Amino acid sequence: MKILHTADWHLGDRLGRIDRTADLRVAVERVAALCKTERVDVLLVAGDLFSELARPDSLRETIRHWQEAFREFLEGGGTVLTLTGNHDNENFCQTLVSAMSLAAPTLGHMGETVPPGRLYLAADPTFVRLEDRLGGFPVQFVLMPYPTPGRYFKGDAALKYGSPEEKNKLLVAAWADALREIRAHPKYDPKAPAVLSAHVHVHGSSVGPSLFRITEEEDVVVEGADLPEQFDYVALGHIHKPQWLGAAKHVRYSGSIERMDLGEAGDQKGVVIVEIGPDGRNGDPGVLSLPATPIYEVSVSNPATDLPRLKAEYQNAQDDLVNLHIRYTAGVDQLEDVLRELERVFPRWYARDWQETGALGPSLAGTEGAGTKSFGETVRDYLGQELIQHDEKEREAILNLADGFLRDLDS
């Protein structure tokens, strides 16, 4: 059985003012193409399928795109196994699971053999069996969503902690208990091939520059010392930096399929391929690289000299994601012109800041007179620039709200 392991798709995500939908759909289509060329049996997505920033209409279109991208894979007997991560909306995913269970009621019944050719989403700890399409031998898949109180606490356990640290400690224990209960289940065969897929931070992993929209203090870190001996392959999600843990090359984070923020600027994105036979894993897992969108910072300290240089150096930066840092001198540089020229070079800037470097330093209000703007005008111009590519109704609503605040200040 050939398995393609991936994770952290964050479909429907945004980076600053940039909607990442198009980038992520291209990445998903590349994964679908690899499923075909590599003759994959199981696509295993280890959590964070969706972004918490995705709107309901965006989620609907995302699922429709999934259907289009993986129709051929599923019709050919391929299976998609997924689980929920910390960025997946629990209510939405539980609703999705309930709807899917009408067509595939066996998911959620511990140890049941599920039919191929379908997508399965686990919102709670569970394990299922899949039979190899050619050999007919069963492979056990243990699916462990990200540890949250709703997914792992039983009874009144959610009421028994008094601090975030205590909650995390209880979640670590609950995660370990849930995994232990699955492996002790009467239908779990310790001698049969087994794959664990989990969306979790395992102790000893390398986080990289930062976790994705979560602090280390907030995160739940579980022990994983026994995992290499317990499973033929461990497919991890949550940490976007691709890696294996220690000497165990079969315990892996696949990493995300796209660069999601500046902390991933240097990451090579990809997916992991592993084969499972009737006696366990066949050889070491392999990595297939995926192209990724360039993301970087650009600093402008002298617009007169830097702008011509940037135009020459970044002639093909139309798709790049850029964080701009601008310094200018009032009376020498026209900020509006500088911003306009930079937008022509980097149309997909996702964040920018600027600072006036004259003797008086940065100033918003200034003195009323020729060539100056009032505080209110400056604020409105700034918001207009920052919201230029947002929905028109949304932009006007924010500007009207700002006008109301400014009127309150003047009164």
Image (cartoon, rainbow, N blue to C red):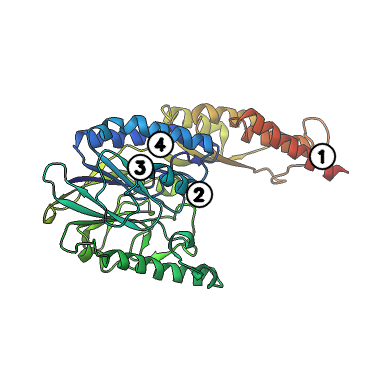
**Quarter of image, res 302:** top right
What amino acid type is highlighted by mark number 1? Thr
Position of residue 173 measured from the top left corner of the image (x, y, whole percent): 40, 71
Provide the residue designation for mark 1: 367
| Circle nearer the N terminus (3, 2) | 2
In percent of the image, x 52 and y 43: which residue is there? 53
- What is the x, y in percent for residue 78? 24, 38
Using the image as rendered, state which of residue 304 and residue 364 is in the foreground. Answer: 364
Q: Is residue 317 left or right of residue 4?
A: right
User: Would residue 76 be found to the left or right of residue 91 on screen?
Assistant: left
Read off the residue under disc 2.
Answer: 91
Residue 355: percent from left, percent from top: 63, 43
Q: Which of marks 4 and 1 is in front?
A: 4
Q: Which amino acid does label 3 sit on?
A: Ile
Residues at marks 2 and 4, CA–CA distance in whole angstroms: 23 Å
Q: Earlier in the sequence, mark 2 or mark 4?
A: 4
- Marks 4 and 3 close (CB-CB < 8 Å): yes
Q: Residues within 10 Å of mark 4 (few under 14, many from 20)?
A: many
**Secondary-structure class at tag 4:** helix
Q: Distance between the residues labelled 1 and 3?
A: 51 Å
- N-terminal of the two: label 1 or label 2? 2
Residue 361 against residue 391 in the figure, above or below: below
- Tell me the amino acid under the disc marked 4: Leu
Marks 2/4 in contact by CB < 8 Å: the verdict is no
Disc number placed over residue 24 in the picture, else none? 4
Image coords of residue 89 (percent x, y): 49, 49
Q: Name the residue under label 3.
A: 257
* Residue at screen point 69% across, 37% down: 398
How far apart marks 3 and 2 lie (CA) works out to 25 Å
Q: Nearer the viewer, residue 168 or 305?
A: 168
Sequence-wise, the earlier of marks 4 and 1 is: 4
Q: Nearer the viewer, mark 1 or mark 3?
A: 3
